[in-house]
Image: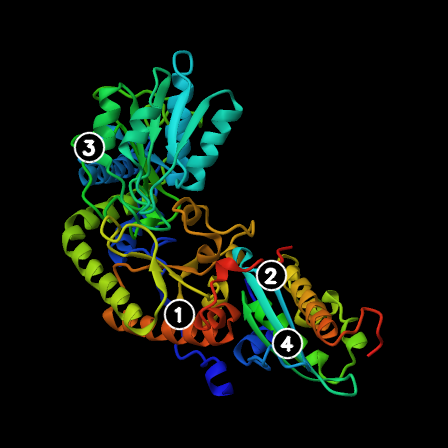
């Protein structure tokens, strides 16, 4: 018996990376494009008076154009930032504060990234009203809920394009149309979506969009905020200084990082269709493989309206952190309380109506550009083995097999 | 988070996994925790006629530290009387496994599990709390 209970030793030198929603490696082409700007072409792009500045500025403006092209925007509408967290802060607080004399209501969604939710809480503490829309079981908002929440006081709606935990994609075009009809600005946190699904700021009536470099095979420490010019969206800058980025974000632009973001966007645009098809196939392969090996697995979030490479699966009766310990050869993350600093299970999963127990049993798997079929097959085997082993250890699995309804038991919580 | 060697050892080679028949008069069963909290431990003790715990088994739904805490406890209770087993403290478990502060509650649950198993055995055998067996 002990052979079944004992875990197999690591077989790989380095774990297989399946956490592409957490971050991505730089594409080698991105690194190559960036390198000259660290040591040879190191000028400050705002140095207007000499060649070093001009060549840096040229590179930054080319990158700006590349970012804009990916989302159907004009280069003048792209503001470089330190990442999507800063972009989200700038969009939400910047627009709210600029308009506070006339309007003081913001609408967002319970499943947004912490930086959006925390920015909204900050606004609430400063006297703004915020509505947090619920989501349906599949993770999507109801357009009727949004319409009902809109008031004369609403200045901004912020709904993320694709969720980082469950990968679901919100109905952006419909949300944009609704916002346009009511004269409300529409911001979307596009960190997980840009470069992975087609986005067009005009077709979708998007007024502001946050972009993250390290989610699309670009470097960490850089992002951008799309800010519409027609009709003009104005915002109060968060960072004051020399007035760079049309006064919206002061600070010397990090030339190599901007170049990296631009190159990452260029590659993403060119390879999006083929990559999405490849990742969707791998994702389905993974899901089919797991379901063939294990009973009682549940996909969290809409099965179709999700990012090509994302899966979020609950493995009933097995706790997520314990499971991750048993699959050391693959790098994934979990919605379990044990893996969060606060010991609370994932608020995103709870918002879907997933009960706490199932939230504890979840794994998030993110496939990406460099994931191979062999890695997916290995992961299926490895996860299936670990889940089976842990189910043998689990009193909940035992009860389930005996036909006991776990929900009927009075637990002695402490 | 990095786990201590002992936690990893218990996780990869858990001791005494399994169960005894719940209705066996010599068996005491403790079921503690809650699925909603992400931690459930089932600890069972088999007590000999001489009042010594002769065997113990566990099953746990929980993280590596929870599994290790309950596995460790099945080793520690063997050969002890019920009173002796009831003195096992979560602090000893936590120290032995080098649990970080955020995982101390796993050791607390393991201590609760022992006490629950002992209480169940005593109740089944008509012994009150103060019986010295």
Is residue B4 at all visible to an observer of this figure? Answer: no
Q: Quadrant location of residue B91?
A: bottom right
CA neighbours of label 4 inside 10 A, class few (<14), some (14 to 19), many (20+): many
CA neighbours of label 1 inside 10 A, class few (<14), some (14 to 19), many (20+): some
Q: Is residue A146 left or right of residue B128?
A: left
Determine if marks 2 and 1 fall on one subunit: no
Against A139, residue B43 (above or below) is below
Q: CA distance from mark 4 to mark 1?
A: 37 Å
Tell me the tag on residue B44.
4
Q: Quadrant location of residue A200?
A: top left
Q: Where does label 3 land, which residue?
A: A204
Which residue is nearer to you in this view: A405 or A173? A405
Callout 4: SS: strand
Callout 2: SS: strand
Q: Quadrant location of residue A154?
A: top left
Q: Chain of mark 4?
A: B
Q: Chain of mark 2?
A: B
Q: CA distance from mark 3 to mark 1?
A: 39 Å
| Whether label 4 touches label 1, CB < 8 Å | no
CA neighbours of label 2 inside 10 A, class few (<14), some (14 to 19), many (20+): many
Against A40, residue A407 (above or below) is below
Determine if marks 3 and 1 fall on one subunit: yes
Q: Where does label 1 land, which residue?
A: A15
Callout 1: SS: loop
Residue found at x 24% / y 70%: A373
Q: How many marks?
A: 4
Tell me the tag on residue B33.
2
């Amino acid at each position: 018996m002990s052979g079944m209970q004992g875990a197999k030793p690591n077989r790989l030198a380095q774990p297989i990376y399946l956490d592409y929603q957490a971050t991505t490696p730089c594409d080698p082409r991105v690194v190559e494009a960036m390198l000259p700007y660290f040591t040879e072409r190191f000028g400050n792009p705002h140095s207007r008076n000499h060649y070093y500045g001009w060549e840096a500025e040229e590179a930054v403006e080319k990158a700006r154009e590349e970012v804009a092209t990916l989302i159907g925007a004009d280069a003048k509408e792209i503001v470089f930032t330190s990442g999507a967290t800063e972009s989200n802060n700038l969009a939400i607080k910047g627009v709210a504060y600029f308009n506070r004399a006339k309007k003081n209501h913001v609408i967002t969604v319970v499943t947004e990234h912490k930086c959006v939710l925390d920015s909204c809480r900050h606004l609430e503490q400063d006297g703004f009203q915020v509505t947090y829309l619920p989501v349906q079981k599949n993770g999507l908002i109801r357009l009727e809920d949004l319409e009902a929440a809109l008031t004369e006081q609403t200045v901004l709606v912020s709904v993320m394009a694709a969720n980082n935990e469950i990968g679901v994609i919100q109905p952006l075009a419909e949300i944009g149309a609704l916002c346009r009809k009511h004269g409300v600005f529409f911001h979307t946190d596009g960190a997980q979506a840009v470069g992975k699904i087609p986005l067009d700021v005009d077709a979708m009536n998007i007024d502001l969009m946050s972009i993250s470099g390290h989610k699309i095979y670009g470097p960490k420490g850089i992002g951008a905020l799309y800010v519409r010019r027609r009709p003009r969206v104005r915002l109060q800058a968060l960072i004051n200084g020399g007035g760079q980025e049309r006064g919206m974000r002061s600070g010397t632009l990090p030339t190599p990082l901007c170049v990296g973001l631009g190159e990452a966007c260029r590659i993403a645009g060119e390879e999006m269709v083929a990559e999405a098809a490849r990742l969707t196939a791998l994702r389905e392969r993974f899901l089919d493989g797991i379901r063939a090996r294990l009973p009682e697995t549940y996909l969290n979030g809409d099965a179709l309206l999700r990012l090509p490479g994302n899966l979020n699966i609950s493995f009933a009766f097995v706790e997520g952190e314990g499971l991750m310990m048993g699959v050391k050869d693959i790098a994934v993350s979990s919605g379990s309380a044990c893996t969060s600093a606060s010991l609370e299970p994932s608020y995103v999963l709870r918002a879907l109506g997933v009960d706490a127990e199932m939230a504890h049993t979840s794994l998030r798997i993110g496939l990406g550009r460099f994931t191979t079929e062999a890695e997916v097959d290995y992961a299926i085997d490895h996860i299936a083995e670990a889940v089976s082993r842990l189910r043998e250890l689990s009193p909940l699995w035992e009860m389930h097999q005996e036909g006991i309804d776990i929900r009927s038991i009075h637990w002695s919580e402490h | 988070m990095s786990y201590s060697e002992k936690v990893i050892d218990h996780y990869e080679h858990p001791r005494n996994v399994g169960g005894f028949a719940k209705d066996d008069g010599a068996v005491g069963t403790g079921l503690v925790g809650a699925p909603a909290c992400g931690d459930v431990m089932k600890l069972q003790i088999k007590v000999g006629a001489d009042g010594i715990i002769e065997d113990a088994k566990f099953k746990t739904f929980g993280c590596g530290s929870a599994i290790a805490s309950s596995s460790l406890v099945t080793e520690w209770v063997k050969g002890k009387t019920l009173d002796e087993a009831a003195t096992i403290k979560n602090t000893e478990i936590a120290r032995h496994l080098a649990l970080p502060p955020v995982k101390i509650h796993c050791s607390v649950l393991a201590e609760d599990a022992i006490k629950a198993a002992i209480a169940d055995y005593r109740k089944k055998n008509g012994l009150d709390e103060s019986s010295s067996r």
